[in-house]
Amino acid sequence: MTGLSGPAAPADGQAARADAAKRPKGRRPRRRNKSASNGEAAAFAADHPSVRPSDASRKLRESGSEPVPAIGDAISKKGLKAGRRRRRKAKGQSSEHNSAQSNARPAAQGDAAARKAAHGTQNVSRATGAQEDMALFQRPAGFPAGKAREARLPALGDSIGSAQTGRRGRPPSGQLDPVRRFSEPDGPLYAALDLGTNNCRLLIARPQERGFRVVDAYSRIVRLGEGVGARRRLSPEAMDRAVEALANCHRKLEERGVERSRLIATEACRAAENGAEFIDRVRRETGLALEIVNRETEARLAVAGCVSLVDQQAEGVILFDIGGGSSEIVWLDLRNRCGARGYALTRFIRSWASLPVGVVNLAERHGGVDVTPQVFEAMVDDVSDHLASFHLADDLSAAISGGGVHMLGTSGTVTTLAGVHFGLKRYDRRRVDGAWLDDVQVTTMIDRLRDMPYEERVENPCIGADRADLVLAGCAILEAIRRRWSCPRLRVADRGLREGILTELMAADGVWARPSQARRGWKGRYRGKS
């Protein structure tokens, strides 16, 4: 200590010892301030033994003889800063500062120095509220759990620094960082359109976390394949209904500004002699370029759209998609998947088959309004004849007998069964998608629908007039599959080709890739993607 000299020092020591003697035992001694004092404060403490040295300056200030802080009141720089922060917060300056930061961020997107000045750092996201939610990158399938903290992305407009990738910089000019696409509120939109034998369906979505968020959807029953089984041609009335629905889809795509899309047509256009002519008409009248996909592609897309519902402990899955003009069946052999899940499971397709029978052509051949038990069995036998010559694999039966295989169904048939099983007064996708039904429950529901008159099927909220004459044909296809391969459990999927298309498009663009993988993509596979 400095500033303590002469008789003041012994007096100070005596006062301290006297004060310690008066203090109750067990109480921690008050820390003495080590700051320098002036002669007046020291003399005051010497003349007043009952006053603590740390209180001397306060006594002097109260008497008006000491205008500056001294013993016991020395304020550090840290304390001064803390006081200023508290005062700013009380006056509302802190909120104004944060608002100025958020307003300055968009203007700083093109200037790295301005970004650093606005945020204070290039590697830490300062997004708040909804922006922070969008800035979180969920690790994709197979991404190590221990790396989850490295998945936080910079704020919008920031460059990706070494904290995330080990390298600094932005993608080449004119390209969007594929890893951060979904973190932007106005990021690119993807669309998938499935023109089937019975339905025209559109889905518009934006990548988000490990999946995507649906922005808009459209569905209309057009029955494009009506009469194709008998005449091998698309009827003018069916084509008119489809073109009208496709025009609505085109309008939605234009309004939303979709950048990436895939528009497919399936069995009705494949089987019809005038399928190619219809595709040309659609291009002329609506501006949409439809792609007629083969059955193998249709089966793969169905798998891609539903694999997220595969049981993580399953050793195999029999996935089936009951359509209007065809039915696809796929066996996923997962005995050696080594922890793979999600979209990665598409690599484990062991074998597949596409049956030229669906709910529309089967109902046209056997009738769908008045379905007696005999008519129902005739439909089951019709489908069984197609399955008799088809073997998914030689050891599938052995895998099923082991108990590690379950069924996964994606179609209006299985979603209808689930809705009726739950007794829904109104169809609710949240209750149906992902629901499990055991073998007894499926049998009970099929028998219940088979015994239900046509009028009652029309009035059922989960069936309705559009499906009342087709649902039993779908039940017959399902029953034939169950008799061929009996599994104890069935999982219901209210998803399919559209979700598969979106998944493949986003995976190809690397929107769920790890940052290091995405940066390699700038030099290769992602270049030129819109």
Image (cartoon, rainbow, N blue to C red):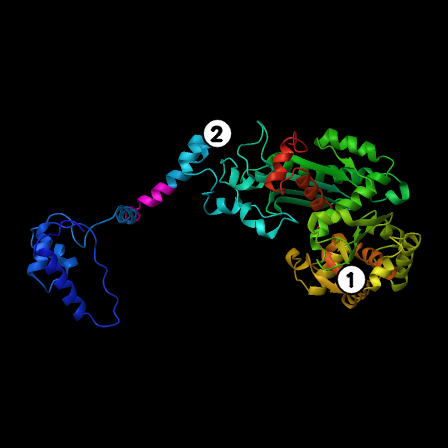
- The correct choice, above or below, for 306 with respect to 49 in the image is above
Q: In this view, which residue lies farthest toward the bottom?
A: 25
Q: Earlier in the sequence, mark 2 or mark 1?
A: 2
Residue 92 lies within the magenta run = yes
Determine the image quadrant of residue 528. Answer: top right
What number is the disc on residue 110? 2
Q: Is residue 505 visible?
A: yes
Q: Along the horizontal axis of the image, is 454 left or right of 15? A: right
* Secondary structure mostly taken by the magenta-highlighted segment of the chain: helix
User: Tag 1: Cα neighbours inside 10 Å, few (<14), some, or many (≥20)?
Assistant: some
Choose between 495 and 475: the one closer to the eye: 495
Residue type at numbered disc 2: Gly
- The correct choice, above or below, for 119 with respect to 58 in the image is above
What number is the disc on residue 244? none
Q: Which residues are magenta?
A: 88-98
Residue type at numbered disc 1: Gly
Secondary structure beneath dot 2 equals loop
Choose between 135 and 388: the one closer to the eye: 135
Residue 510 lies within the magenta run = no
Task: Give the residue number, with chain letter if any, for mark 1.
Answer: 404
